[in-house]
Amino acid sequence: MAVTILIPAPLRRFTEDRASVQIEAKTVSEALAKLDELYPGIRERICEPDGRVRRFVSIFVNGKDIRSLQGVETPLADGDEVGIIPAMAGGR
Amino acid sequence: MIRIARKQYEEIVAHARQEAPREACGLLAGHGDRIEQVYPVSNRAELAVEFFAERGLIPPGRDYRPEAPGTIAVERFFMDPEEQFRALRAIEAAGLEHLGSYHSHPATEAYPSRTDIELAAFWPNMLLMICSLADPSQPVIRAFRVADGRVQEELIIVED
C-alpha cells in the first residue's frame, strides 16, 4: 500500500531536499507517523502535539482537503497522493 | 533582481484592480530570476479568522465579518488552500519553478506589512511581490524576500 507524500519546499530541509517520499500507510495519520520516523521532527511542523493538523497547514489526498474528508483518519489506498501545504497569507 | 514580462506584470495589476477593495493574491512561477507565469488564487480571508486571531493579527475592536462595515477581512489575504495546491501542481506539471507569491495592497504602500513579514515565515526566502493601488492611476509593484523577519528588496526588471 505505497502512497506518495508530496513535500512542500519549506519542509524539504527535513527530507534531504526530496520533493516526494514513498511510504506504506493505510491512513494519513499513519503516513505522517512513518514520515516522522524517516525524517524526525517533520511531523511537529505539520501537526499539533495532540495530532490535529495545524491551522496553517492543509493536507490533501488526491487533491481533496482532508478537512472535508475524515481528517487525519482519512484512509489511503495504493497509489494515493498526499499533499502537504503551509498557508500563504498576509495583509496590509 | 527579478525579471518579469510586461504581460505578467499587467496581469498582476489587473487582478489587483479587479479584487479591490479586497486584496488579490496568487502564485509566481518561472525559471531562476525570471517570472514566466502568474497563477491567480482566490482570497479566502473571511474563512481564516481564527488563523489571524491566534497570531494577534486582528486589531482589537475590528470587526472581521466580511459583510461588516470597516471589516478587517478586506485588509487580509489567505489563499484558498485547495486552489493553492492545484496551482502548485500545475506549476510542476508545466515544468516551472515555484518562485513565490504576489498580493495587493489596495490602499497602502507596496511594502511588506507586519502581517506579511510574520506569515512569510512559512515560506522563507520565497519571492513576495506586492502591488499597491494607493494611487489608483499609478499602480506600484515591488518585490521582496523575507527570512527571519528581515526584509530584503529585489529590483524588478519589466521586459517588453
Image (cartoon, helix red, strand yellow):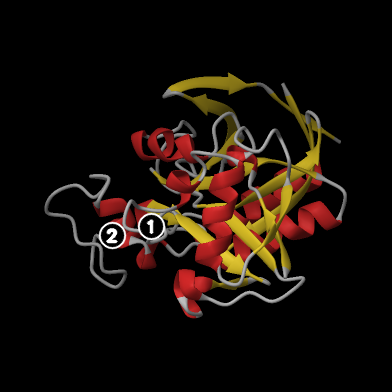
Q: Which mark is residue B139?
A: none
Q: Is residue B102 left or right of residue B34?
A: left
Which subunit holds the residue at mark 1?
A
Which subunit holds the residue at mark 2?
B
Same subunit under labels 1 and 2? no
Where, by quadrant of the figure, is residue B18 drawn? bottom right
Q: Is residue B26 above or below residue B100?
A: below
Residue A12 x/y as whole percent:
64, 38
Residue A71 x/y as whole percent:
46, 73
Residue under the image location 26 percent in, 61 percent down: B71
Q: Are marks 1 and 2 in contact (CB under 8 Å)?
A: yes
Q: Is residue B41 above or below residue B140?
A: below
Residue under the image location 72 percent in, 21 percent down: B1
Residue under the image location 69 percent in, 33 percent down: A16
Between the residue at mark 1 and the residue at mark 2, the CA separation in whole angstroms equals 8 Å
Residue B139 x/y as whole percent:
57, 41
Q: Secondary structure at mark 2?
A: helix
Residue under the image location 38 percent in, 43 percent down: A92
Q: Which mark is residue B50?
A: 2
Number of callouts in the render?
2
Q: In this figure, which residue is indicated by the disc labeled 1?
A: A55
Q: Is residue B144 above or below residue B11?
A: above
* Residue type highlighted by circle 1: Arg
Looking at the rendered image, the disc whose residue lies closer to the viewer, 1 or 2, is 1
Residue farthest left in this picture: B61
